[in-house]
Each structure stands twice: as C-alpha cells, then as structure tokens.
Amino acid sequence: MIHKLLLRIGLPLLLLGGCHQKSEVPVIGFVDAFEDATITQAKQGFTDALNTHGYNEEDGSIEIVYRNAQGDIPTLTQIINYFIAEKVDLLAANTTLSTITALQRTKEIPVFMMVSPTPAQMQLVDTEGEGPANLFGVGEELAYIDTSFALIPKFIVPKDGERIKVGMIYNQSEPQSVDAMKRVEGLAGKLNIILEAMPLTSSADAQLVTQSLLNKDIDVFFANPDNTVFASFETILKNCNQRNVPIFTSEAGLVVRGAVAAFGADIYQWGYQAGEQAAFYLKNGSLEGLHWEIVKVRKRVYNPMMVKRYGLSVPDGFEAIK
C-alpha cells in the first residue's frame, strides 16, 4: 500500500521535473497534450518565431519550460497547475486539450493557442459569443474542411455505376471532432459520397475501429482534424496501406507522414504565427492590440510516393511535399 502511494505521489513529480526558480528573463510554459510528429512542427514554428524576434534560450533572452502530458488528462492538468504556480509570463498551448485545460485553470496568464479550433468550436464562448479575455494565438475554423473533403473526387475515380465510399473516425469526446464529422456528413451527401463514420474515445481504439471501417470495403479513409487521429496516424496508415486504401486529410502535416493529399493548415506556420504574437507581447509588455487569429497559411500538398503507390493523377495547383 505504501509502495503504491509513493508511486502515485512520485509519478507527477517525475513528469513535471524539479522545482523551477523564477527567472529575471521572460518565462514561457509550453505544453503539448501528447507526443506527435505533426504537432511537433507547431512547437518548432513557435520557437523559431521567438528567435526571429530576438528571444533565444541560447543567449539567455528567454526561458521556455517544456512539458508533454503524453495524452494523460490528469497529467495535463498538473502541468498547467505547475505553470500557474510558477507564475510563467505566458502559456503556449499546443492542440485543443492543452488550450481548453489552460483556459479552465487560469483567467490571468495569457494563453497562446496553436493547432486548436476557434473558441466557439471549443465551447469556450460566453452568452455574447466572446471567447476568454486571456486567449490569444491562432485557431482554425471548420470551413476549410469543405475544400479538403472535396479533394477526394478529384483524385479518385469511382467504379462504373458506384459511389465512392469514404471512412472516417472521430473522437466523440472532442466537440470540434464531432462538429467536423457532422460537417463532413453533410458534404458527403452533396458530393454523392457514401460516408462510414465510426466513433472512438482514445488512440488505443484506433486499431480496432480502423479495421472495422476497412471491413466495410471503404475506398478512401479521410483523416479529419482530430487529436486522436494525429496521435494514432501511423496505426491508421499501416492498416489502410495493407488494404490498399488511400488516406486524404485536411492537415498538411499528415501528408508528410503518409496521407495522399491535403488542403489544410501548414502546422509549422501555425505555430510560427502564434509565436509572432507571443514575441509581440514580450517585446511590448502589453496585450493591447492582440487577439486570437485564424490560420493564415494553408496549402494544397501531395505525397509523391503515395500518389505513385495508388496510381493517382494529381490535379493542378498542388505542390509535392519535401
């Protein structure tokens, strides 16, 4: 019993690290909700923007305290509480869960979001439709999914007399994921596409749910903007490739990881845009004139290797990933 208690107490301390001494230089608490190759690009963009504006850890002009919750909600809450207790100058929240948790725990420390939807989609607006006063950074709206999903008929030619059948998974506990599924459902009808959508609650379910979709003889898998899809993408990709089912997506970062094509936000630029806001705040010492923004950089990209694998033709206006 004592051993279990020590483990329970000790684990959060190991995750959070040692006590942080308040520095005379600006301190940023940067939190990732989970480990993922795509959202890591946002972190790189954020720090690169800070460097561009003269804030660099190497020369001691800034301190970034980085923590990753590894997909564990209690750990995520502990991380945010730790940053609040240490009175960091600002919180950098990467992905939806990080943003929501930060805003639930503090109303004073500025929160700069990235790889997150709008406040309305996160259900964080008041009765007048206004988001939290301490929310800044960069969000994305669902409208771009229209263009993303509409890519599928441009690449895939249906069999004679048949409709394209598209499968997708969505996290039923994430509001923006449910909203995205409903939007895709409406688009499928307009595009004469059959949609097979299945819910899941965590990345641990991805293998089983993806296989269930593939057993429905889907022609295409659509990877929607969902943190669970990000975290389990390699599992999804492996299963789809084994059944010769191409993946299309709304996230350019997933094309690098094996999807065929996307129209969506450049994740690196998403983080860079948020980092520019953070640098402005640090340089001016004021939040006046700052507000959260919509993503500015979106791209039409394709993966040459996957296009070749599935024998597809690329429409005009797309660039190959590097």
Image: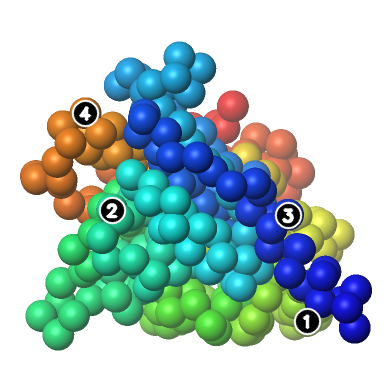
- Front residue of 113/109: it is 109
Chain-order first, disc 4 or disc 1 = 1
x, y (%) of residue 207? 80, 72
Q: Quadrant of the N terminus?
A: bottom right
Q: Which mark is residue 212?
A: 1
* 12 w.r.t. 31: above or below: below
Distance CA(mark 3)–CA(mark 4):
33 Å
Q: Which mark is residue 14?
A: 3
Badge 1: how crowded within 10 Å, few (<14), some, or many (20+)?
few
The amino acid type, in three-letter code, at marker 4 is: Lys
The amino acid type, in three-letter code, at marker 1 is: Ser
The answer to whether residue 261 of the structure is visible from this angle is no
The image quarter containing residue 11 is bottom right
The answer to whether residue 202 of the structure is visible from this angle is yes
Q: Which mark is residue 283?
A: 4
The amino acid type, in three-letter code, at marker 2 is: Pro
From the viewer's perspective, is 321 left or right of 298?
A: right
Which of the two discs, 2 and 1, sits closer to the camera? 2
Chain-order first, disc 3 or disc 4 = 3
* 229 w.r.t. 284: above or below: below
- Front residue of 142/137: it is 137
Chain-order first, disc 3 or disc 2 = 3
Residue at 62% across / 59% down in the picture?
A: 69
Residue at 86% across / 59% down in the picture?
A: 242
Chain-order first, disc 2 or disc 1 = 2
Residue contact between numbered discs 3 and 4, judged by CB atoms under 8 Å: no
Residue contact between numbered discs 4 and 1, judged by CB atoms under 8 Å: no
